[in-house]
Image (cartoon, rainbow, N blue to C red):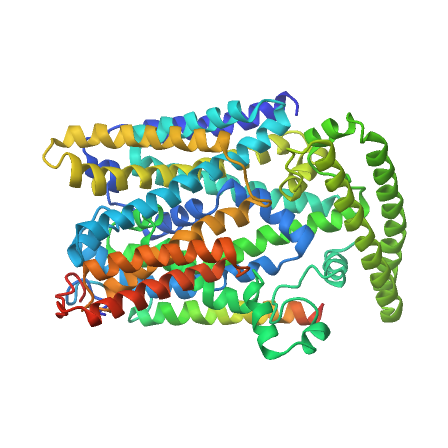
Amino acid sequence: MSNQLSSGEEKVPVFKSWRGWYGLLLIVLILQLAFFVFLTWYF
Amino acid sequence: MNSLDWIVLFGTVAAIVIYGTWRTRNQRSMESYIKGDSQMKWWMIGVSIMATQASAITFLSTPGQAIEDGMRFLQFYLGLPIAMIIISVSIVPIYYKLKVYTAYEYLETRFDLKTRVLTAILFLILRGLSAGITLFAPALVLSTVLGWSVGITTFLIGVLVIVYTVSGGNSAVSLTQRQQLTVVMGGMILAGILAFVKLPDSLSFGDTIQVAGALGKFNIINVVPGDTAEMADLSIWQKINRVLNDRFNIWSGLIASVFLFLSYFGTDQSQVARYLGGKSLTESRLGLMFNGLLKIPMQFIILFIGVLVFVFYLFNQPPVFYNPVLKEQAWQTDKRDTLQRLEKAYENAYQRKQTEVHALVDAIHAGDEIKKSEHTSRIKSIQKEENQLRTDVRSTIKEAIPSAKTQDRDYIFLNFVLNYLPHGVVGLLLAVMFLAAMSSMAGELSALSSTTAVDIYKRLIHPLASAKHYLTASRLFTIGWALLAMVFAMLASFAENLIQFVNIVGSLFYGTILGIFLTAFYVKWVRGTAVFIAALVAEAVVFYCYGYTDLGFLLYNIIGCGVVMGISILIQWVSPTKNPDTGAGVS
């Protein structure tokens, strides 16, 4: 599935492609998970 | 409630309704009514998505959930960012490419008319029921506070939503949602800050966290449900069964809820309309990323406010039963003596607990781990006693008034607001419940109306009418659905906890709807008739599971989706007309 509406029309803000945004979302999710695991384990 | 609270409550609600109606008064066609002016930026889309999802039920029920059950409900939202990514990659580009008004329009291009209509009808049933519940929760709250009947408060909220939704359509919904969510989150955070400020001076923020943590409120991640030692004695199948029947654990959060959110955000018109109103595909995708980044922190904040209120109630005597109206009624029956005896025992238990809580704080200050552990275990044992007394009170009330809804979790946060927060803030927090209900109900009504207008009325009943005719029809459908939701809210008998009931209703239909869409997107050779039959079978299977099994409701999403995909593939495979489909619209 292409990320483009039609070739070359969509300019992705901040990152080079949408993969950057998806990666950011996954990293934030993993960090949140780590924080929640820490809270659960610590208490 | 004093006059300041009334001014804040009605001033806030009226200002948003009047502003939203005035700003979006010039609707000329069904397109602008349903899609808005297609000028929404990413942050507006993100806010609108979050405001549609978060109803008054979220803000009433979630803090109570944290107080009784800790923060483990947060796991339910862990699958949301994953769903946002999948929708952004697969689904949004297709909707943009086909320039659809509703998600179900796509299904006719891909399959056939009957599949489009069936899916639209499943959505209308699901969303119509949910709109009733969305309205019922704050109506119940206000009726309790004001001493009015639920009917009057339901009517008031419903009419307010009708005013700006009928006038301004999707634009009014999105515009008001921005102001509503700002007030809602501001009000909730203020309540959390005040809960902390009202704690004893000797208790620092760190102490508060330690007390809540020691008493098990930060049980966010559950790998196995229940007691770990108890689980160790079970066979592998018993363990799996226990995990499947548990509503909130890491597995249901990361796997099953992905399916629910995929279905909700990808195929539910009340959410699809939010991002289809975007200025461009890029803005819509960024709006989804915004939701994926902020939703979990937002739920964390709401649950954390519940934890702060929990600690507050360790230092302030809570009532034995949180619904004040029902309590007063029950205390006037012949069960009065039993209830008074139970209340006295509850007060006694609280006095003992408070002594232990102060000792626990001293142990935390002294860094004495042994004493900390001793006091924690004593507090937990008293809490068990308290819980048993509350259960006894609930069953006694049920005996006294058999028709009573004795689950009072949804009143816990409200009890704190009404009895301990200063005037003005009480009005603001009640406005929060009003606005949250209005924002999600408006999104739902707008989607119900557009689906009825586009997928049923324009497609099947009156295909060749003027733009003005369709605009009038869309407005009438909005009023019709609002009236239905109001009737449903007044008549319905609800499950024990409102927020979970909403999620259960969603799960009964979402799996099937998602299965139809996933087959459309990814199994290009399956055709309309196969998926239509599979959807009917899937719905029957899901209802069977609901009626005759103990499976956790999140699993219905996977089952419904799996049955649609599996059966449709099987039917198409054995069908003599097997023929690769064009898969229109899929790039």
Residue B553 x/y as whole percent: 50, 57
Closer to the camera, B245 or B272? B245
Which residue is rendered at x = 52% and y = 22% of the image?
B152
Q: Quadrant for residue B346, please give it.
A: top right
Residue B34 appears in the figure:
yes
Viewer-nearest residue: B27 or B119: B119
Image quadrant containing the N terminus of chain B:
top right
Vertical comparison of B435 with B189: above or below? above
The spot of residue B246 in percent (x, y) is 58, 63
Query: Which residue is located at x 72 percent, y 75 percent?
Result: B229
* Residue furthest left as drawn: B464
The residue drawn where x is 30% and y is 34% is B169
Residue closer to the observer: B462 or B164: B462
User: Height in image: B577 above or below B188?
Assistant: below
Point out residue B284 in the picture as x, y percentages from the top left corner. 30, 55
Viewer can see residue B36: no
* Residue B227 vertical position relative to residue B136 in the rendered view, above or below: below
Q: Residue at x 68, y 43 (%)?
A: B194
**Callout count:** 0
Displayed quadrant of residue B382: bottom right
Q: Position of residue B447 (x, y in %)?
A: 32, 41
A37 relative to B541 in the view: left or right: right
Is B54 positioned to the left or the right of B469 in the image?
Answer: right
Is A8 on the left or on the right of B442, as rendered? left
State the quadrant of the C terminus of chain B.
bottom left
